[in-house]
Amino acid sequence: MSLVSILEAGRRDFLEATRGISPERASRKPTPTSWSVLECVEHVVVVEDRFLSWISNGRPVTPRRNDENEIRLFTMIRNRLSKVESPEVVRPQGRFETLAAALAEFQAVRDRSVQWVQERGDSLYSIGAAHPRFGKVNGAEVIHLIDGHARRHADQIRENCEILANSLGTN
């Protein structure tokens, strides 16, 4: 599957997770320590934009493609069983007042990600970056991290909606 196809499938998954969520439900936290749907979307937007900046400011590296590592990175970042404390810089700050505004920005940042992949293609394997948790990665691996991260939070949004539905009744 191409990197563009991966990003587009991730976009569909993320948008599907947010479909039909009322404004009230979007800003409600299922527990005092968890994030609301709106906060999850904000976080995904901020992280994806940050990851794109890593690619745009990346250093040249010897091109290498490692399918196993790409799958490993995607699987690790998507896994919701391992809880990870987000760095302060990517925590939700209330940047969006509505879910519609947050999703519009998600669409915009995902469009930029897709454009990066379309413009750079295999040269993404020649761009190096450093992830604080996963270490040295190339641009293509960053794209897998972008996709896995959004899908991780799509899963979180689904979990949040289920918790809220059980505690408040249906949407």
Image (cartoon, grey):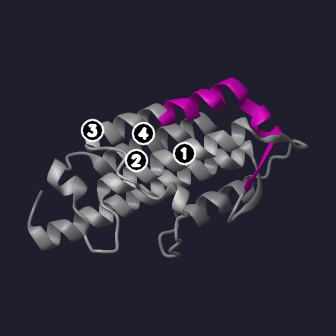
User: Residue at the location (35% across, 55% down)?
Assistant: 39
Kind of residue at disc 3: Ala
Q: Secondary structure at mark 3?
A: helix
Quarter of the C terminus within the rendering: bottom left
Q: Which mark is residue 13?
A: 2
Q: Which mark is residue 106?
A: 4
x, y percent for residue 12: 40, 41
* Residue 164 sits above or below residue 110 on the image: below
Q: CA distance from mark 4 to mark 3?
A: 10 Å
Q: CA distance from mark 1 to mark 4?
A: 9 Å
Kind of residue at disc 4: Phe
Residue 148 position by quadrant: bottom right
Q: Earlier in the sequence, mark 1 or mark 4?
A: 1
Kind of residue at disc 2: Asp
In this orientation, which residue lies closer to the viewer: 60 or 10? 60
Instruction: Please indicate, yes or no, whether residue 22 appears anywhere in the rendered image.
Output: no
Q: CA distance from mark 2 to mark 4?
A: 13 Å
In this figure, which residue is indicated by the disc labeled 3? 100
Q: Nearer the viewer, mark 2 or mark 4?
A: 4
Instruction: Please indicate, yes or no, whether residue 50 appears anywhere in the rendered image.
Output: yes
Q: Earlier in the sequence, mark 2 or mark 1?
A: 2
Quarter of the N terminus within the rendering: top right
In this figure, which residue is indicated by the disc labeled 1? 48
